[in-house]
Image (spheres, helix red, strand yellow):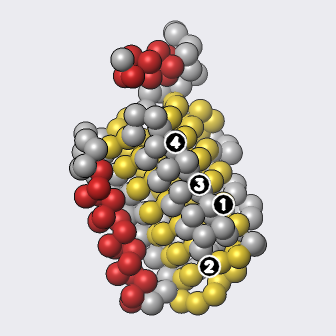
Amino acid sequence: MLRKLKESFFSSFRKSGSSTESPYPKVHETAWVAPDAVLIGDVEIDKNSSVWPGAIIRGDIGKVEIGENTNIQDNVVIHPSSKEGVFIGDNVTVAHGTVLDGCDVEDNVMIGINATALHHSRIRRNSIIGAGSLLPPGAETDPGSVYSGSPAEKVRDLQDQDKEVMKKMSRSYVNLKGEYE
């Protein structure tokens, strides 16, 4: 029943016979999307990734690409602010309540609860964004760094123990999704 409702919902975003059709989301067979998560339009989710309850991912303006082993936790909102879209890499943790609006997130990143990254910002590989942090429009982090605050500022370089926590978090969500499939 829920699948039919989703198909009906998605079809309302399509204009038959038009070259401006909004494509259906593409979810890899090993990925998991919670039944009450919302995926609209040009959204692509790769291997072993997960999208948790209440998350909203809108690929209606531009494409949203989510890499492998990435978890999009409860009540996250992801939306492109332009046709450039949103790219989220592999092994990324996007914690509860985060807003990603027209930004890019490279591989091996952990974004804390209720963080916000605004249009044209870029979170570079091997970075942590602290809970409640704000990356303003056009901000770019240094790779291998920890950022915190509003606006977010670099607080230190990433340490080996941080990398272990990030790997553990990514793996734990790959395993946890198996409980719900």
- Identify the residue shown where x is 37% and y is 69%: 169
The residue at the point 51 percent across, 19 percent down is 9
Nearer the observer: mark 4 or 1; the answer is: 4
The image quadrant where one finds the C terminus is: top left
Q: Identify which residue, 80 or 150, lies in the foreground.
A: 150
Q: Which mark, residue 97?
A: 3
Q: 66 or 3, which is in the foreground?
A: 3
Residue type, numbered disc 2: Tyr
Give, as a three-letter code, the residue at label 1.
Answer: Thr
Q: Which residue is mark 4?
A: 54
Alpha carbons under labels 2 and 3: distance apart: 18 Å
Q: Secondary structure at mark 4?
A: loop
What amino acid type should be assigned to the residue bearing mark 3? Answer: Gly
User: Mark 2 against mark 3, which lies toward the viewer?
Assistant: 3
Residue at mark 1? 116
Q: Quadrant of residue 121?
A: bottom right
Say if mark 2 contacts mark 3, CB within 8 Å: no
In the depicted structure, whether residue 95 falls above or below residue 158: above
SS at badge 1 = strand
Q: Residue at x 38, y 78 (%)?
A: 165
The residues bearing labels 3 and 1 have C-alpha atoms spaced at a distance of 9 Å
Measure the alpha-carbon separation of dots 2 and 4. Answer: 26 Å
Apparent side of residue 48 relative to residue 45 in the rendered image (left or right): left
